[in-house]
Image (tube, rainbow, N blue to C red):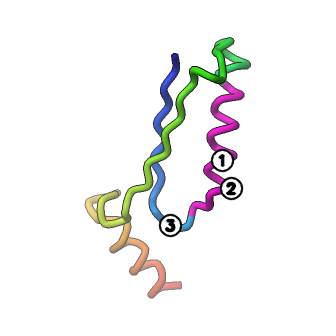
Amino acid sequence: MPYVNIRVTREGVTAEQKQQLIAGVTELLVRVLNKKPATTFVVIDEVDTDNWGAGGESLTVIRKREAAAG
């Protein structure tokens, strides 16, 4: 009974993209590990950019700096 957790920043991931991720991960586990789709669980967590950091800064700060420079 596989459980896969995908975390992405909350920056406009569409319902269609999420469905593609769920289907793709499920298919991969069926193909590679011979797992049953009905018992394969995929959870997508969307994280606010204030709560996701890299290089000592939140992604909110990084995105604002990139937008100002761009």
Q: Nearer the viewer, residue 30 or 68?
A: 30
Q: Residue at x 45, y 58 (%)?
A: 9
Where does residue 67 sit, x and y in percent of width and height?
48, 83
Q: Is residue 44 above or below residue 55?
A: above
Mark 2–mark 1 Cα distance, whole angstroms, equals 5 Å
Badge 3 local density, few (<14 within 10 Å), some, or many (20+)? few
Answer with mark 3 or mark 2, whichever residue precedes in sequence: 3
Against 2, residue 14 (above or below) is below
The amino acid at mark 2 is Glu
Q: Are marks 3 and 2 in contact (CB under 8 Å)?
A: no
Q: Is residue 27 magenta?
A: yes
The disc label shown at residue 19, or none: 1
Viewer-closest of 58 and 3: 3
Q: Quadrant of residue 13?
A: bottom right
Q: Residue 22, percent across and down?
A: 62, 39
Image position of 51 (left or right of 45): left
Residue at figure coordinates x 30%, y 60% from the top left: 51
Look at the numbered disc 2 and give the secondary structure of its residue. helix
Q: Is residue 60 left or right of residue 20?
A: left
Task: Write down the region rendered in magenta.
Answer: 13-28
Q: Which residue is located at x 66 percent, y 47 percent? A: 19
Query: Is there a contact, CB below 8 Å, between mark 2 and mark 1?
Result: yes
Residue kind at label 3, given as amino acid type: Glu
**Along the polypeptide, which appears first: circle 1 or circle 3?**
3
Q: Give the residue at x 65% y 29%.
A: 26
For discs 3 and 2, the disc positioned in front in the rendered view: 2
Label ID, residue 16:
2
Task: Inspect the magenta stretch and tell me whether residue 40 lies in it.
Answer: no
Which residue position is annotated with label 3?
11
